[in-house]
Amino acid sequence: MAVALALVAALLFALGSVLQQKAGLAEPRTGSSSGLLLRMARRPVWLAGILADAFGFVGQAAALSLGRLAVVQPLLVSSVVFALPLGARLTGQRVRPIDVGAALLVLGALIAFLVVANPSDGRDDAPFGQWLVAAAVIAAVVAPMVVVARRLGPAPRAAVLGIATGILFALSAALTKAVTDRLDDGVLELFVDWRLYALLAVGYVSMTLNQLALSTGVLAPAVATSMAFDPIASVVLGTTLLQESLHETPLGTAATIASLAAALVGIAILSRTQAGPPAAKPAAGSDAAALLAPAAP
């Protein structure tokens, strides 16, 4: 059941990403990135994308409540396969065979990882101090990516922001698992629990970075990197923070590393080979350009 719920969530997340990209390309407006989501909320297409994401989140939360973090999150990478044809249909982008092949490589590699690594055991929550350490490490990784992205062109910018988004998605998933575990104490107890507010904060930041990545108009690297680094980061969080176990034999370790390496190769291909310009690009001074325009030399 956890596998089926994760796949449904992946489809809904793919639809949400494409609709949010379509809205971001349609009518760019001036303003700072801090209010980007509030301005995007005025666009019905973007709200439809958020609704799809919301249903996807429900499916993800249900899957996480039934399964392990290191199992559910890798399955969500199938969003890459769903998003490419949806993007071609809804935003008019041309997807080349190499993009499809690279997406399938990412999907196959991560499914292979899931089978070989065979995650097991683990816990649903961690002590507060360990959450703080995990958050600090993730912030130290993500913050420089956002800064570096300002100097990059559309495709690599989308890829870098997608990586940052995927890492934050993984943290959101871990927090979601902890929050759903707290439901046994009653719904009202959640409103005095720090985990819920941490989830909301991380969710807001990750959604903003995701929208900025999609607003570059280059769908494949934005979706591929976020959907691939989500399970990779989730495995790291699952094995360290939530104490989930992976396959520990030498052969299993080698196969696990090989499958992750293959996924990264697919991501690299998608980041470099996205074909065709977007249907519309954010104008100078738009939300995406305001934060991420290449810096002057």
Image: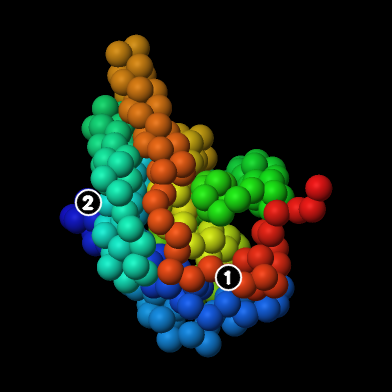
User: In the depicted view, which residue is nearer to us: 124 or 14?
Assistant: 14
Check disc 1 and report the residue beneath it. Answer: 282
Q: Which image quarter: residue 53?
A: bottom left
Vertical relation: 224 (above or below) 216: above
User: In the depicted view, which residue is nearer to us: 281 or 255?
Assistant: 281
Q: Which residue is drawn at the image coordinates 40% and 65% (left, top)?
A: 17
Question: Please, what is the three-letter code of the amino acid marked with disc 1?
Answer: Pro
Q: Which mark is residue 3?
A: 2
Asked whether the residues under the numbered discs 2 and 1 touch, taking CB atoms below 8 Å apart as contact, a structural biologist would say no
Q: Which residue is drawn at the image coordinates 34% and 67% (left, top)?
A: 92
Q: Which mark is residue 10?
A: none
Tell me which label, 2 or 1, sits earlier in the chain.
2
Residue farthest to the top, as pictured: 250
Question: Please, what is the three-letter code of the amino acid marked with disc 2?
Answer: Val
User: In the depicted view, which residue is nearer to us: 23 or 60?
Assistant: 23
Q: Which of the image's four quarters has the N terminus?
A: bottom left
User: In the depicted view, which residue is nearer to us: 192 or 213?
Assistant: 213
Residue 162, position as x, y percentages in the image: 51, 51
Name the element at disc 2.
helix
